[in-house]
Image: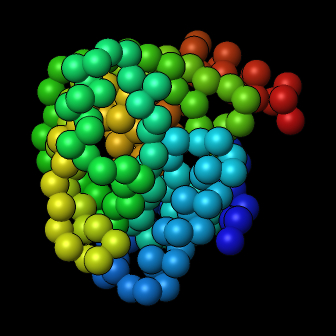
Amino acid sequence: MILEIEKYGSGKLRIPARKVAVTPELVALAESMLETMYKAKGVGLAAEQVGRDEALCVIDVPESCEDDEATKAFNAQTVQPLVMFNPEIVSSCGEQTGREGCLSLPNVGGDVTRPAEVTVQYLDMKGVPQISTVRGFLARAVCHETDHLKGVLYVDHMDEKARDKVLKKLKRHK
Ligand SMILES: [Zn+2]
């Protein structure tokens, strides 16, 4: 089922998510979120973005988004799409700055600094605890989506001037 995506300004994007147990209803929600994300040509979607408050996000970053072969090979250890319930970044290292966009702020993007590598703990669709270490753009996506679950948007990480620029552009596209 295609779900409606909450846009910047919606209070629902600012509500911290609550931890959940994996139920058939939430697995069905995750499947609808994947369907919605693919249709919108996104690479990640958090439950907040479809008006929900569960700690759940989905990610599917195409290999072509990664800069180098080493990162592609490293990330191949993590099977995508990633469906993560109660995700928590347990460690991170390094730094990368690059362009980010968000389905809740359509048609705009901006540079954000993120860790180069993150390790994330979560429950998979079967409710089994998993741990994944990812790099590059996929690490950026994990940071972006886990931020959503805290009510944080990528523009919150930008300085005021850069943020104003993105928000002005966003207004023009409305
Ligand atoms: Zn987003």
Relative vertical location of residue 32 with respect to residue 138 in this rendering, above or below = below
How is this picture coloured?
rainbow
Residue 14 falls left or right of residue 114:
right
x, y (%) of residue 35? 61, 60
- Residue lying at 65% horizontally and 42% vertically, measured from the top left: 41
The C terminus lies in which quarter of the figure? top right
Q: Residue furthest bottom?
A: 24
Examine the rendered structure and indicate whether residue 94 appears above or below residue 123: above
List x then y, in percent, for residue 88: 24, 54
Q: How many marks?
A: 0
The answer to whether any part of residue 13 appears in the image is no
Q: Compare residues 140 and 75 and report the one nearer the observer.
A: 75
Residue 134 in percent (x, y) is at: 24, 37
Give the quadrant of residue 109. top right
Give the residue at x 30% y 50%.
79
Q: Is residue 22 left or right of residue 155?
A: left
103 lies left or right of 130: right
| Viewer-side residue, 18 vs 129 | 129
The quarter of the image holding the N terminus is bottom right
Q: Is residue 142 left or right of residue 43?
A: left
Which residue corresponds to the image point at 41% horizontal and 31% vertical from the top-left? 63
Q: Position of residue 95 (x, y in %)?
A: 25, 18
Q: Nearer the viewer, residue 9 or 84?
A: 84
Residue 105 visible in the snapshot: yes
Residue plotted at (49% across, 85% down): 25
